[in-house]
Amino acid sequence: MSSAYAQQEHGLLPNEAPNPDLDSGKDLLFDLGAAVDDDHELQVHTVLIGNIGLVLPKHEVSELIDHPAVCRLPNTLPWFDGVISVRGSMIPVFDLHLLFTIEPPAGKRRLIVVGQNETAAAFWVDDFPRLLVLRDEDGTTTEPSLPSLIHGHARKFYLKDEQAWVEWDAKAFFTVLGEKL
């Protein structure tokens, strides 16, 4: 994150950001599951991959990478773009558009990293993450049409602003993808 973003959105300068080495039990900058007004509302970050709306994991660090230098690996599947280095860790990069045969957007795509260190994975999204407030009444039992790999890791579905959003187990999803390589 840029220092301007940290200061603008959170009122912190880069040197005031929480230290991940301290055992605070909670990352203040990336608490994506913070209650808004009451126990029935939740602020979440969401991303789009074509028409698939994904809720970023609430208890995982998520990060937008600008200008990533992805190193392609030979003899891998087309939807595996390679790896990037993030703070000294090699992170796998997946192209879910190719995996699900979804036309990528015409403009610049963004790379999102979810998780940290050896459990982190990165994937391309259509645009910047969007902050949504989800309420109990936004939850739906009507399951949207999803690729089976995502559907198998779905936890809950929401309908907000005429878009279906899926709360999913990203760690398990990317573990399965890693096993397919």
Image: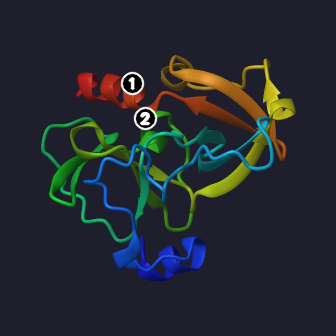
In the image, farthest residue toward the right: 137
Give the side of residue 24 with respect to residue 58, left or right. Answer: left
In this view, 70 is above or below 102:
below
Give me the disc on residue 6. none
Q: Amino acid at mark 2?
A: Leu
Residue count near mark 1 (Cα–Cα under 10 Å), binned few <14, some 14–19, many ≥20 = few
In this view, 84 is above or below 150:
below
Q: What residue lies at 60% left-to-right and 40% top-to-bottom?
A: 55
Q: What residue lies at 59% left-to-right and 49% top-to-bottom?
A: 47
Q: What residue lies at 56% left-to-right and 56% top-to-bottom?
A: 126
Which tag is nearer the camera, tag 1 or tag 2? 1
Query: Residue 39 falls in which quadrant of the image?
Result: top right
In this view, 179 is above or below 61:
above
- Quarter of the picture holding the C terminus: top left
Disc 1 designates what residue? Answer: 172
Q: Marks 1 and 2, how far apart in space?
A: 16 Å
Earlier along the polypeptide chain: callout 1 or callout 2?
2
Residue 174, position in %: x, y? 36, 31
Residue 14, position in %: x, y? 38, 77
Q: Secondary structure at mark 2?
A: helix
Q: Amino acid at mark 1?
A: Ala
Nearer to us in this view, 5 or 24: 24
- How many numbered dots are placed on residues in this image? 2
Residue 107, position in %: x, y? 55, 67
Disc 2 designates what residue? Answer: 99
Q: Secondary structure at mark 1?
A: helix
Residue 41, position in %: x, y? 77, 41
Give the side of residue 24 with respect to residue 141, left or right. Answer: left
Q: Are marks 1 and 2 in contact (CB under 8 Å)?
A: no
Nearer to us in this view, 81 or 103: 81
